Image (spheres, grey):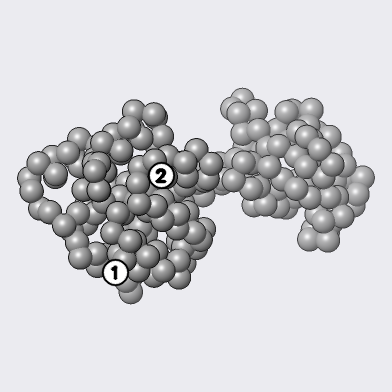
Amino acid sequence: MQNRDLDILKDLNILYLEDDINLLTHTKDILEDFVHHVHAVQSSKEAWEILKNEKIDVIISDILLENESGIDFLAEVKDANIQLPIILTTAHTDTQYFLDAIKLRVENYIVKPINIKELLESLHDILLPIIQKKEIIKNINVIKTISAVTDSIQVDVVKYIISNLDENDTLVASYSDIMNNISISKPTLIKLFKELNEKNILVKTAHKTYKFNAHALDGF
């Protein structure tokens, strides 16, 4: 793990499906030292409830569960058009399991007993390109937004806006919050927000709350 920065896992939410309660608890306890949260369940029914109600970034699932198949569950996930990276775990090395995993286009296949180092490295390698893609999109949006704004003094504000968007592309900040971080006059700041709103780039949805609309940048 020396060449991998596991700090990138700190915001990761994992759905972990395993019917062996001892293994489930042990692995969950270790993973939560590195990730944000592990939703540990023993059945596909519980897993579906988590998928419906929680934000999940990665699914880890055993192949052979008690009275059901992890492969069948993951196939249903794919059929429901839920696009999440998948890591399969199994105590078996039968060729058919590998073929089923290939059909599902899973990201990795780990043979039990689970090697935590291998699991963490796999999570890192899955997450890294996703993070890099988000950073590229963020940088593109900064450039496009700056292109949409004519006053160069407002560039730092644009960078602040993009950097402080939540996962839903929402900014929660007051003019004072921004002015405490950036040396800009209130009239200039108000002018910028008005201009971004008129271009439908940053739309106010509630008090101190703004929705960033990346699609509005397509013409820039």
* Viewport quadrant of the N terminus: bottom left
Residue ID for mark 2: 47
Q: Nearer the viewer, residue 85 or 216?
A: 85
Instruction: Tell me if 107 is positioned left or right of 112 in this view.
Output: right
Q: Tag 1, which secondary structure? A: helix
Q: Extreme right residue here?
A: 187
Q: Residue at x 52, y 46 (%)?
A: 55
Number of residues whose C-alpha sits closer than 10 Å to that of mark 2, classed few (under 14), some (14–19) or many (20 or more): some
| Kind of residue indicated by mark 1 | Lys
Q: Nearer the viewer, residue 120 or 15?
A: 15
Rendered view: 135 above or below 180: above
| Kind of residue indicated by mark 2 | Ala
Q: Extreme left residue here?
A: 95
* Viewport quadrant of the C terminus: top right
Give me the disc on residue 117: 1
Give me the disc on residue 142: none
Q: Extreme front residue here?
A: 67
How far, Cα to Cα, is label 2 from label 1?
25 Å
Rendered view: 89 above or below 6: above
